[in-house]
Image: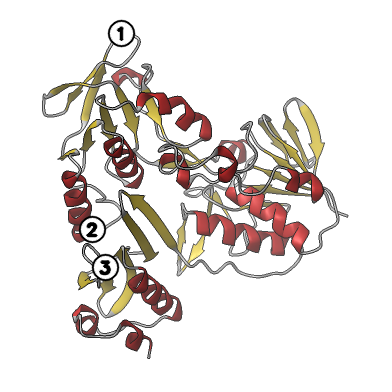
């Protein structure tokens, strides 16, 4: 039976291996990960785990014993140096491993501040791995001043944790508004007001000029000339797909490791899934940075590695937790021309419905799981209700499905 090697022991890699066994693959499976911990959830790292509300073991996707019990060789603390496509081998931790099929689930890497503006100073953190969060956790002492660089979801979630822990928080966003790249002004306004209520100082249209300090950060100079004394910095300015290994092996790259609709790369023996993979979607090529995509795409790739010949049909959805607000997003809002606001049933609950002409593209739902679920079902069914009906609080949401 074929030996399948999976590089990347995150959500996608773990899901792919489990699915292979679930489908009855009896050949060898080797799962290689750079970190020392077995595959774990990333979303709670910057929220429940950092707040001390979740134990380490609860982060694990599966008990550590799962891998041995299912005949999955889990190699942790192991860096893959190279892929030799001609010989069908990978060099991992100095050892040569032969594969029949290879899956790349290498994920993504956070963008860091350049050294010329102080990105290498102590006290400057990113949020991606368990190590990152364990390293920054001692910084969160009441009364200290945290500077958050970047007003996307990662930055806002970090700001929420810091504010809840009693820190003084300043967040700077170079764009005109927070969440500008991913959400409508209505969603930006909602979260700006939410953070203001918790005392977070959000400065939009303001970038970071340079960080101050000799070996450890002590302050920051902003693009508007303001200087702040800060105790530490969290950088949340996005992620990039981890493609270095694939590039070095000569695989095609296009906003990530380029795959066909079934998850196959430009080498028929190599597949890709998760944050690192770009795939065809409605006539375009996209990457989805989300847990649901990592699971669903990896499981589809597992089926195809065993011969299913099945196209991956993405159903994009995302979420973010900030304070007592759960944001749930269904669909992709790219190209929207109008946003319909629908008040929720409870205080603070609302939803924003994105339309391109008469076509429903996406829904942002804040503490409104019903609006999210109905919106998700409508989008997946290709149905677009009348925007006026959506906006009318008297309209029963379920009636929109008819």
What mark, if any, has residue 351 been given in the picture?
A: 3
Q: Residue at x 29, y 39 (%)?
A: 164
* Residue 14 position in % (x across, y down): 65, 49
Q: Quadrant of the N terminus?
A: bottom right
Residues marked 3 and 1 touching at CB (< 8 Å): no
Give the vertical position of 250 relative to 226 (above or below): below
Spatial separation of the CA atoms under disc 3 and disc 1: 46 Å
Spatial separation of the CA atoms under disc 2 and disc 3: 9 Å
* Residue 291 position in % (x across, y down): 51, 54
Residues marked 2 and 3 touching at CB (< 8 Å): no
Q: Residue at x 31, y 23 (%)?
A: 232
Give the vertical position of 372 relative to 193 (above or below): below
Task: Assign a secondary structure to mark 3.
Answer: strand
Q: Quadrant of residue 262?
A: bottom right
Residues marked 2 and 1 touching at CB (< 8 Å): no
The answer to which of marks 3 and 1 sits earlier in the sequence is 1
Residue bearing the label numbered 1: 214
Q: Residue at x 20, y 50 (%)?
A: 194
The answer to which of marks 2 and 1 sits earlier in the sequence is 2
Residue at the farthest bottom position: 402
Task: Assign a secondary structure to mark 1.
Answer: loop
Task: Assign a secondary structure to mark 2.
Answer: helix
Residue bearing the label numbered 2: 187
Q: Residues within 10 Å of mark 1 (few under 14, many from 20)?
A: few
Of residues 351 and 266, the one drawn nearer to the viewer in this rendering: 351
Apparent side of residue 391 relative to residue 398 in the rendered image (left or right): left
Q: Residues within 10 Å of mark 3 (few under 14, many from 20)?
A: many
Spatial separation of the CA atoms under disc 2 and disc 1: 39 Å
* Residue 260 position in % (x across, y down): 59, 61
Residue at the farthest top position: 214
Q: Quadrant of the C terminus?
A: bottom left
User: Mark 3 or 1, which is nearer the eye?
Assistant: 3
């Amino acid at each position: 039976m074929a030996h399948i090697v999976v590089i990347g022991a995150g959500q996608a890699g773990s899901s792919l291996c489990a699915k292979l066994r679930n489908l009855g693959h009896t050949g060898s499976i080797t799962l290689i990960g750079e970190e020392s911990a077995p595959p774990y959830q990333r979303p709670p790292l910057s929220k429940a785990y950092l707040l001390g509300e979740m134990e380490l073991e609860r982060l694990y996707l599966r008990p550590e014993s799962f891998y041995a019990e299912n005949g999955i060789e889990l190699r942790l603390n192991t860096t893959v140096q190279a892929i030799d496509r001609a010989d069908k081998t990978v060099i991992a931790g100095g050892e040569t491993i032969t594969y029949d099929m290879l899956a790349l689930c290498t994920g993504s890497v956070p963008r860091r501040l350049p050294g010329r503006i102080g990105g290498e100073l102590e006290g400057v953190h990113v949020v991606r791995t368990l190590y990152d969060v364990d390293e920054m956790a001692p910084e969160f002492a009441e009364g200290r001043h945290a500077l958050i660089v970047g007003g996307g979801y990662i930055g806002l979630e970090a700001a929420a944790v810091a504010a809840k822990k009693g820190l003084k928080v300043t967040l700077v966003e170079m764009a005109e508004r927070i969440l500008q790249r991913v959400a409508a002004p209505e969603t930006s306004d909602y979260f700006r007001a939410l953070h203001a209520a918790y005392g977070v100082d959000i400065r939009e249209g303001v970038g970071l000029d340079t960080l101050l300090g000799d070996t450890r950060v002590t302050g920051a100079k902003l693009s508007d000339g303001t200087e702040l004394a800060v105790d530490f910095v969290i950088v949340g300015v996005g992620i990039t797909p981890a493609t270095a290994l694939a590039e070095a092996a000569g695989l095609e790259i296009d906003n990530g490791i380029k795959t066909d609709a079934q998850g196959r790369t430009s080498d028929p023996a190599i597949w890709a899934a998760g944050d690192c993979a770009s795939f065809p979607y409605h006539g375009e090529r996209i990457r989805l940075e989300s847990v649901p995509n990592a699971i669903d795409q990896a499981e589809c790739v597992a089926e195809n590695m065993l011969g299913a010949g099945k196209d991956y049909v993405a159903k994009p959805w995302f979420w973010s937790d900030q304070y007592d607000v759960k944001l749930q997003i269904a669909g992709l809002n790219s190209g929207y021309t109008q946003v319909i606001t629908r008040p929720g049933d409870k205080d603070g609950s609302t939803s924003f419905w994105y339309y391109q002409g008469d076509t429903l593209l996406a829904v942002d739902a804040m503490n409104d799981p019903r609006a999210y679920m109905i919106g998700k079902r409508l989008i997946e069914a290709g149905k677009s209700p009348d925007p006026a009906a959506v906006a009318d609080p008297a309209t029963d949401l379920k009636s929109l499905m008819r």
